[in-house]
Image (cartoon, grey):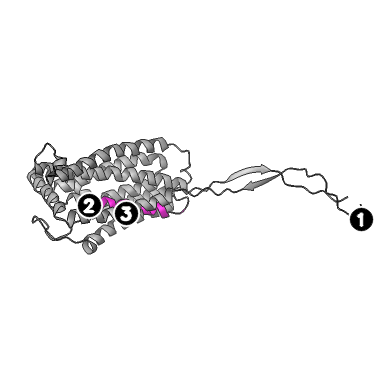
Amino acid sequence: MPTSGGRVARHDGSRTGPDHRTFVSRPRPSPARPAGLAVALAAALGTWLVWWAMVTTWPGQRVEESVFETADRFQDVVNHLVEPVLLLGSPPWLAAGLLAVCGIGVLRRRWAAAALAAAVILGSNVTTQLIKDGVFHRTGLVGEWNRDINTLPSGHVTVVAAAWAALLLVVPRGWRPATAVAGAAVTCAMSLATVADRWHRPSDVVAAVLVVVSWTALVCAVAPAGWAGPDDGPARRGDAGTRLVVVSLGAVAVPAAVLSVLAAAATEEHAWAVLPWAGGLTAYAGGLLAGCAISAAAFAVLLAVCQATARAGRTLVQHRACLRPNVSAPT
């Protein structure tokens, strides 16, 4: 149809004929990975703070010397009970744990998870030895046991805690809550054994667990997307179990930590922290409670971090239909 300017106008036909488009929606950035990084940094800072408070100060050394003196009184009673536990922290068990954990990942064909688990075990144990022998130091202010020899962090506790923390990365999502409970129990047992048999001070135990927490949280924070495999979907079984275990372990950790701090304060004769025991027994009980508290708290945090970062690694793809203009031939 000619126009006033002599040009022929093109008539577009009706815009019919639906067509389907596929949109790939990019999910909002999850806070799980930044939270994992924050946990890693907090645990690393906590390791230093424990060393500063308990190794470099008079009050810290006095409290732990009181723990050691009381442990000496009970050593003959507990020695035969805790020796089998202490064997689990030896180098052969470190190698066995590494092979077993990574083997589970390989058998499940979770190659990334197996590599991350190996990083947790090797990184934690190497870090413990490096900072114990080359970073932290000890000047004996009180007592004679290992007066000027730094024993923080505990290598035995690191071996056990790292193996169970790494196991969280290679087992299926639904198994992680039970794995966290078992890891907390075994780590607590090793912590109690090392203190009761006078192998380590309570601060050595706490620092060792914090090293493992730092490494595991860091690995989860930087892990590649999809590292846990397709069975870690957002609505899988095990999430209710995760919440139950996190709350339960927290319910153990918080009162134990409070009582441990009160015991240390009572040992230093602070009137606001009077407990119904003599000084040495108070310090000893507080030292044992510190191992229980840090074990429960660590695996509660690591379970939450592991589940959250595994879920956050998945890419969501959404398909939806819409209408696209269909231009008919000109008339």
Give the secondary structure at mark 1.
loop
Specify whether residue 34 is in view. yes
Residue 121's disc number: 3
Observer-side mark, 1 or 3, equals: 1
Q: In this view, does 223 lie to the left or right of 214?
A: right
Q: Distance between the residues labelled 1 and 2?
A: 94 Å
Residue 250 picture location, percent across and down: 30, 39
Q: Which amino acid does label 2 sit on?
A: His
Question: Which residue is located at x 30 percent, y 41 percent?
Answer: 182
Disc 1 target residue: 4
How many C-alpha atoms fall within 10 Å of the one at disc 3: few (<14), some, or many (≥20)? many
* Separation of residues labelled 1 and 3 (CA atoms): 82 Å
**Residue type at numbered disc 1:** Ser
Q: Residue furthest bottom?
A: 134
Which mark is first along the chain, 2 or 1? Answer: 1
The first of marks 1 and 3 along the sequence is 1
Question: Is 239 or 294 nearer to us in this picture?
Answer: 294
Residue 162 pos. (x, y %)? 30, 51
The structure residue drawn at horizontal position 14% and vertical position 44%, both measured from the top left corner, is 270
Instruction: Determine the secondary structure under disc 2.
Output: helix
Q: From which residue to which does the magenta span run?
A: 207-224
- Residue 96 visible in the snapshot: no
Secondary structure mostly seen in magenta is: helix
Tell me if residue 297 comes above or below residue 155 in the rendering.
above
Image: 157 above or below 285: below
Q: Nearer the viewer, residue 315 or 289?
A: 289
Label 1 crowding class (10 Å Cα cut-off): few <14, some 14-19, many 20+?
A: few
In this rendering, the label closer to the viewer, 1 or 2: 1
Residue at 68 percent across and 43 percent down: it is 322
